[in-house]
Image (cartoon, rainbow, N blue to C red):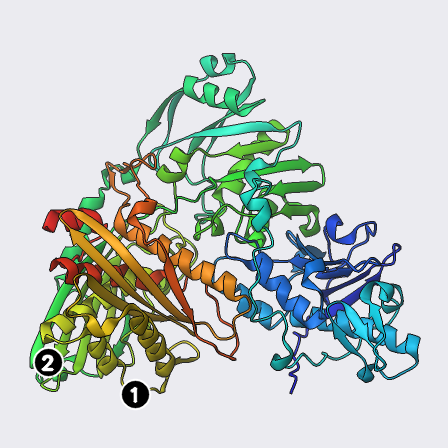
Amino acid sequence: MSGCMELSRRRFLKVLAGTAGALVVGIGYADAAEVPIPPGMLGQDFGKLGAYVRIDRDGNVLIGARDPDTGTGTATALPRIIAEELDADWTHVTVVPLGLGVENKNGKPVWSYGHQRSGTGDSIPAAWADLRQAGALARWLITQAAARRLGIAADRLRCEDGMVIAPDGRRFPYGSLVEAAGKIDPPGAPLPLKAPQRYRLIGQNAGDVDARRIVTGQTGYAIDAHYPDALVAVLAQCPWPDGSLASIETASALAVKGVVKVVPLKPEAGVPPGQTAIAPAVAVLAENTWAALRGLDELKLEWKPGASAGEDSAKLEAQALALLDTDSAPTARVRDDGDLKAANRKAARRVEAVYVQPWLAHATPEPMNCLVRLDKDQATLVVPTQAPQQAWAVVQRLTGLAPDRIAIEVPRVGGGYGRRLDHDYVAEAVMLTKAVDKPVRLMWTREQDLAHDYYRSSTVHKIKAVIDRKRHVIAWDQRMASASALAGRGVAADRLWMSEVAADQVPAGLVPAYRSDWYGLASAMPRGPFRGEPHVANAFAVESFIDEIAHSLREDPLDTRLRLLGQPRQIPLAGAGTLDIGRLINVLKLATDRIGWNNWLHTVNGLGLACWHVNGAYVAHAIEAQVKGEKLSILRAVCAVDVGRVINPLGLQGQVAGATLDALSNALNPAITFAGGQVQQQSLKDYPLASMAQLPRDVEVITVPNDGAPTGASFLAMPTAAPALANAVFRASAVRVRRLPLMKELLRLL
């Protein structure tokens, strides 16, 4: 039976029959008189409407993609959800990025497209509860138009591949019906949605809609955008985030041909991180990039350090270790189940270990950049962002413009990983545009991108487990120390742990006595969202430790995990939803079966495994590794995932494989260190990402068929890859790596 989706009281469907005869359908807000649409969607119809679907007379269908695509496949998956309900012919569908949708309601913004956020794992879940109605409405209008033309009941017609098919077999292309369809009033209630057994697009492979343009170099990124009259701006940033400009000589820089102006910048007082300049800086603005960079080289600057000048990453780690070794009260007790003292009295065995992970940078392929034009009553930007509504907030605060006078275009984004959830670079570009009263194209260099990031904090974990005579883990005491990514961002002090650890992470709810404590570290180093956090850092410690428990018991690590998980059942989570143990066991068994785990003890190479759950999705990795001398080879990587209903299996495989390789790269080599308050890494030579030779030739992805509501997958495979690798390395070399980066520690211990 088909289901009906309840739209929010503030959302409604809108229809426009344009002057060119096209049908345009979208979802708007009841509070918005008009909803913007890109000209590319309207064709000749330059009116305003919240657009998701446009059908032209020639049968071509344009579908808007509302969430930025950072490589997560949203530009393919979201339009296919609409196209499915529309019964569109996918070969005649063109996808159009919608950009920011905002309207003015008494000076307050009204978001035309609802959810507009990418890389946070919620694009598809939000779309599943939203976008199907847009496709269903367009199909309903087309069907009603055909029924009126034929003089029969609409329920006698069916739609398929952009055609309305009559009972006698006659076919009417959608394009021939759009003019009449646009004159029909939409229904007042949500429409019934297609039954899953009728899906023709959802669950079927689809290549990325931008794939051909990407591989042929035709895709336009924000860094490629320009205005003919725009000045290029490059920055010299203070090496201390809380430092200041002591002196400056600009004569040599201004003497460079093409250099127009030199402008100092500084973070705005009282504005949270990610919404203003990341550090004091001096910008050189010039007629072209070459002149700007030459002018930058000619600047004579002296910076004055701030209080952070004494910070040292090694000392901060020592402080964390000392904190975890004391009985001092934690900054936050994240979870406390059962009685640890009583469990300790039943101990037959105790296991304890400490795990350390470094500071990490995002190292996005496309460095930070922003193109801005400010007119008297209009701002126009081209921004590589994961969250255009948050970028809008920065522009609106700096300009004071009415909500609907800020237009933000979001082309394909060259990687996000959480970095583009912050918009310091947008603030810098807007401030510079105001300073010179001309359009500005701000360009960060790769060196600046590494040395001035919102980093992932180093984490230190100390875990103790108590095991009884029946080999059951009866107590788990985990302490974690880190510098919260939420510090200074308006989050209450007793909630700062939420960016660092999850209250429901394994083995919470599985162990009778379970305690999770977080110790907050003070640091002036900028921190912010990072792909897979808070799960990645915690999964490495937890899943490595479970492997150590198995080794101490001299048993198969798979058996240890299965005993810890217990029988398939539903466990209520502290936040919302449930943990489905059966689904977690299933992905674990699928991955280990594919890797050939039954031979784990006797294989020449090492096998390792790990499993995790994230927001209703389940993942497991099994990895085969070989250690010969000082060379580590990752021979195989298998990842099994259960994400509910899969919209685009090919896209999901790409996300899982890509996240696996990203996680392995982060684990193998890179680390951010700082001394005297200054970051030591200035280039990819100092911050080495994994080479192709270091990574597996292929990642085998197993997708569990599931008819449940879809969940996110953009970072699902991140948490378990590194611990599975570390566990495989232990079996291959007898060396237990408890500190990342893995290669440096492995070579130290061999």
Q: Mark 1 against mark 2, which lies toward the viewer?
A: 1
Measuring 43% from the left and 78% from the top, which residue is drawn there?
576
Measuring 48% from the left and 43% from the top, which residue is drawn there?
424
Left or right placement of residue 93 versus residue 701 in this view: right
The residue nearer to you, when weighing 146 against 444, is 146
Examine the rendering and report whether any part of residue 690 can be seen.
no
Q: Residue 717's x, y, as percent?
A: 38, 63
Left or right placement of residue 59 versus residue 709 in this view: right
Q: Residue 684's x, y, as percent?
A: 34, 37
Which amino acid type corresponds to the residue marked 2 in the rendered image? Asn
Which quadrant holds residue 598?
A: bottom left
What residue is pinned by disc 1? 567
Question: Secondary structure beneath disc 1?
Answer: loop
What residue is pinned by disc 2? 344
Label 2 crowd bin: few (<14), some (14–19), many (20+), radius 10 Å: some
Q: Residue 81's x, y, as percent?
A: 62, 68
Which amino acid type corresponds to the residue marked 1 in the rendered image? Gln
